[in-house]
Amino acid sequence: MRKLKLIWDFRGPHAKKIAEHHNIHLKEFIQLESLNITITGVEDLSDSHSIAFLVVDETDMKPIRDALKPHRGQVYTGK
C-alpha cells in the first residue's frame, strides 16, 4: 500500500519553532481521532524553511487531508 506524506510549510526566522509546535498539534489530532498513524515529524529544509509532516496510507488520506488542510503532499519514500 502506498503511503503519502502530508506537509505543512513554515518560512521565516521562527519556522523551526512553528513547525515543532504544529507537530504537537498533529500528534494531538492523531490521538483525539484514534488514528493508526505512527510517522510524524519536523524537517529543516533551510535556515528559514521548515516543515511539519505526517505519513498516512493513501486509502486514509482524503478525510485527514480535508480535516487538516496540509499545504502539499508527496509519495512517502521512507527518507
Image (cartoon, helix red, strand yellow):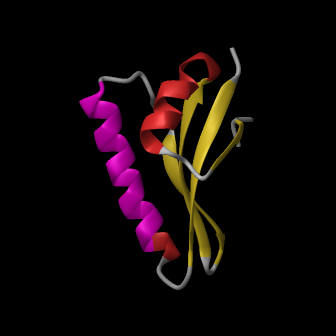
Secondary structure mostly seen in magenta is helix
Image: 76 above or below 15: above
Q: Residue at x 63, y 22 (%)?
A: 58
Corner quadrant of residue 5: top right
Image: 31 above or below 53: above
Residue 32: x percent and y percent? 25, 32
Image: 27 above or below 18: above
Question: In what quadrant of the picture does the C terminus appear?
Answer: top right
Asked if residue 43 lies left or right of residue 16, the reply is: right
Asked if residue 20 lies left or right of residue 55, the reply is: left
The residue nearer to you, when weighing 3 against 65, is: 65
Residue at the bottom extreme, as displayed: 13
Corner quadrant of residue 20: bottom left
Magenta-colored span: 17-33
Residue at the front extreme, as displayed: 66
Residue 49 within the magenta-colored segment of the rendering: no
Asked if residue 74 lies left or right of residue 56, the reply is: right
Q: Residue at x 40, y 57 (%)?
A: 22
Residue at the left extreme, as displayed: 32
Residue 57: x percent and y percent? 59, 22
Corner quadrant of residue 61: top right
Image: 4 above or below 25: above
Residue 52: x percent and y percent? 52, 55
Question: In what quadrant of the picture does the N terminus appear?
Answer: top right
Total numbered labels placed on residues in the image: 0
The residue nearer to you, when weighing 39 against 28, is: 28
Q: Residue at x 45, y 28 (%)?
A: 37
